[in-house]
Image (cartoon, rainbow, N blue to C red):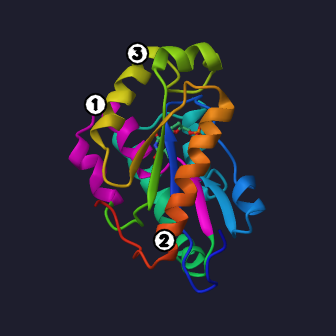
Amino acid sequence: HKRSSDSRGALIVLEGLDRCGKTSQSYLEELGHAVESWRFPDRTTNVGQMISSYLGNKSHLDDHTIHLLFSANRWEKRSLMESKLKSGTTLIIDRYSYSGVAFSSAKGLDMEWCKAPEIGLLAPDLVLYLDISPEKAAERGGYGEERYEQLEFQKKLARSFKALRDASWKNINASLPIEDVEKQLRETVLNCLETCGQGKPLLELWL
Ligand code: 2DT
């Protein structure tokens, strides 16, 4: 499964409802791929700290304001993301612009308005949507203290995600046992690495 050293890495995004059980980079590393796992929000930056305080209910922000901060948090990382991909590192990112738009539009913001600040960010080669019913996710996880972890909101969110499906989108049945979920993920990811190794261009949102 090794690719030639001059081919770019793949941009792979994991999306889905909260508490659906996300997988790791170790499998690809075992196959000899250069790979890093990232997540958004990246709480380590200044913008990320504002987001973190908001998510922990330690500060209040208007829905539009927090939306733009989430987007800014991705823009902060865009150039590093591009150079990593071009130097051959595959990035597996937990949440991206799809979460950005789905969460804010589930709160009632206009979807087109939500998409606008994402325009020009790198488009994922593959979006793995971990699909599980909000009821089942609630059973599994035991929703916690952070914002957004209520069943009614999760239902709206699932509808918003569905409206965002595009060609890079792949539904993964996340209500299966974890081994089966990981098997689906591995197969889909390897497929994607193959396509990217064959010279698929890196594109920008929205496709
Ligand atoms: P984690 O629990 O995965 O750290 O996410 N969120 C995330 C948004 O509302 N907009 C975004 O752009 C992103 C990336 C999802 C923290 C919460 O932040 C939400 C859950």
Q: Is 59 placed left or right of 38 in the picture?
A: left
Magenta region includes residue 20: no
Amino acid identity at mark 2: Cys
Mark 1 or mark 2, which has the lower sequence index?
1
Front residue of 94/116: it is 94
Q: Nearer the viewer, mark 2 or mark 3?
A: 2
In percent of the image, x 46 and y 21: which residue is there?
Answer: 133
Whether the residues at callouts 2 and 3 have beta carbons within 8 Å, the answer is: no
Query: Is residue 138 depicted above or below 195 in this figure?
Result: above
Q: Describe the element under mark 3 as helix, strand or loop.
A: helix
Q: Which residues are magenta?
A: 90-118
For badge 3, the amino acid type reads Glu
Report the residue at 64% width, 20% height from top: 141
| Vertical order, 175 against 130 (above or below) | above
- Residue 12 vertical placement versus 62 (above, below): below
Q: Name the disc covering residue 152, or none.
A: 3
Choose top left, top right, bottom left or bottom right for residue 85.
bottom right
Q: Give the secondary structure at mark 1.
A: loop
Camera sees residue 45: yes
Q: Is mark 3 within 8 Å of ligand 1?
A: no
Residue type, mark 1 in image: Gly
Q: Earlier in the sequence, mark 1 or mark 3?
A: 1
Q: Is residue 196 above or below residue 39?
A: below
Q: Which mark is residue 108?
A: 1
Give the main secondary structure, helix, strand or loop, of the magenta stretch: helix
Q: Residue 27 at x, y = what percent?
A: 72, 54
Q: Nearer the viewer, mark 1 or mark 3?
A: 3
Distance from Cα at disc 2 to Cα at disc 3: 38 Å
Is the residue marked by circle 1 packed among few (<14), some (14-19), or many (20+) residues within 10 Å?
A: few
Question: Where residue 14 sits in the image (x, y, percent)?
Answer: 53, 46
* Residue, disc 2: 196
